[in-house]
Image: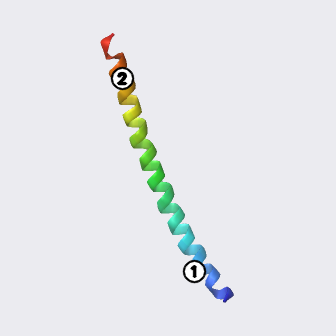
Amino acid sequence: MEKRLPEQSALNSTQISGFLIFIYGWLIVIKEKFLEGLHGDQDGD
């Protein structure tokens, strides 16, 4: 049963990597939208 640990560890690593990339991309999109909103508000200057 202990021989299954390495497999799960590798799977976990892949899942975590994909999750981090997903969150990273999501944050970039949110940041872009946020900055767009700020620029939109200050466009009257």
- Residue sitting at 42 percent across and 42 percent down? 28
Judge from the rendering whether residue 9 lies leftward or rightward of residue 45; answer left or right: right
Q: Nearer the viewer, mark 2 or mark 1?
A: 2
- Residue sitting at 56 percent across and 70 percent down? 12
- Is disc 2 surrounded by few (<14), some (14 to 19) or many (20+) residues within 10 Å? few
The circle drawn on residue 38 is none
Q: Amino acid at mark 1?
A: Glu
Q: Which residue in the structure is indicated by mark 1?
A: 7
- Is disc 1 surrounded by few (<14), some (14 to 19) or many (20+) residues within 10 Å? few
Residue 3, above or below 43 = below
- Residue sitting at 66 percent across and 89 percent down? 1
Judge from the rendering whether residue 36 lies leftward or rightward of residue 11; answer left or right: left
The circle drawn on residue 39 is 2
Q: Secondary structure at mark 2?
A: helix
Earlier sequence position, callout 2 versus callout 1: 1
Q: Percent x, y for residue 14?
A: 51, 68
Judge from the rendering whether residue 15 lies leftward or rightward of residue 38; answer left or right: right
Q: Amino acid at mark 2?
A: His
Q: Percent x, y for residue 40?
A: 33, 22
> Residue 5 sits in which quadrant?
bottom right
Q: Residue furthest bottom?
A: 1
> Residue 45 sits in which quadrant?
top left
Q: Percent x, y for residue 43?
A: 32, 16
Residue 26, above or below 36 = below
Q: Percent x, y for residue 18?
A: 47, 61
